[in-house]
Image (cartoon, grey):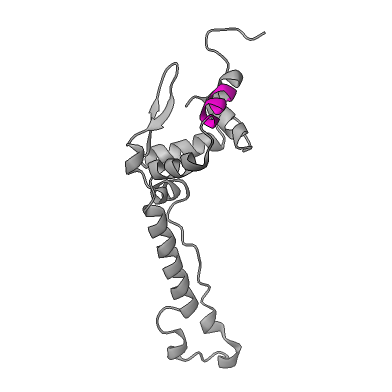
Amino acid sequence: MGSAEAKQFCRLDRLPTGDRRGIRCELFTKLQKAGIVVARKGIGGGFALALPATDVTAVEVVEAVDGRKALFECKGIRAQCARFGDRTPAWAVDGVCSIHALMLEAEQRARDAMAAHTLASIKGRVSTKTPKDHTGRVQEWLAARTPRRGRRRS
């Protein structure tokens, strides 16, 4: 996908297009480093999937873009309970906090759910609810807004 096409996709989704080195470049660079996309140089260049869409999971894309961040950050408030003053008993802070344990479980379930879906399966889900002529209309819309190479714009 070239820069002009990427801008059109951003407009299609009403995302800010920014400058040429903006968010699109950052996202595609992260996806490239993760081995999800490859860069293609030259006319008609841009980015393409490095693997079949059936082999790329949603969790891989999320982790490539955002890293493996925790959904919840425990602040260790058990040790700061006013009831204990400055003498927090060991039992109060022993092991994983109950709230933190719940959040770790929820995070793992979310990752498992994302790992169960590939780019191809997501596309399939979208395709089942999208009118048959929608893809063609999107391609026409993009083509009408993408400048032709080698032509001067007046």
Magenta stretch in the rendered image: 133-141
* Residue at 36% over, 43% down: 56
The location of residue 15, given as percent across then percent down, is 62, 38
Q: Nearer the viewer, residue 124 or 83?
A: 124
The location of residue 36, given as percent across then percent down, is 37, 39
Is 136 rendered above or below residue 69? above
The location of residue 152, given as percent across then percent down, is 60, 7
Is 114 rendered above or below residue 25? below
Q: Quadrant of residue 153?
A: top right
Q: Can residue 35 be seen in this snapshot?
A: no
| In the image, residue 122 lies in the stretch drawn in magenta | no
Is 116 rendered above or below residue 120? below
* Residue at 63% over, 37% down: 16
* Residue at 51% over, 42% down: 129
Is 35 rendered above or below residue 7? below
Q: Is residue 47 left or right of residue 10?
A: left
User: Which residue appears farthest toward the right when viewing the image?
Assistant: 154
* Residue at 53% over, 38% down: 130
Q: Can residue 37 be seen in this snapshot?
A: yes
Judged by its main secondary structure, the magenta piece is: helix
Question: Image quadrant for the C terminus?
Answer: top right
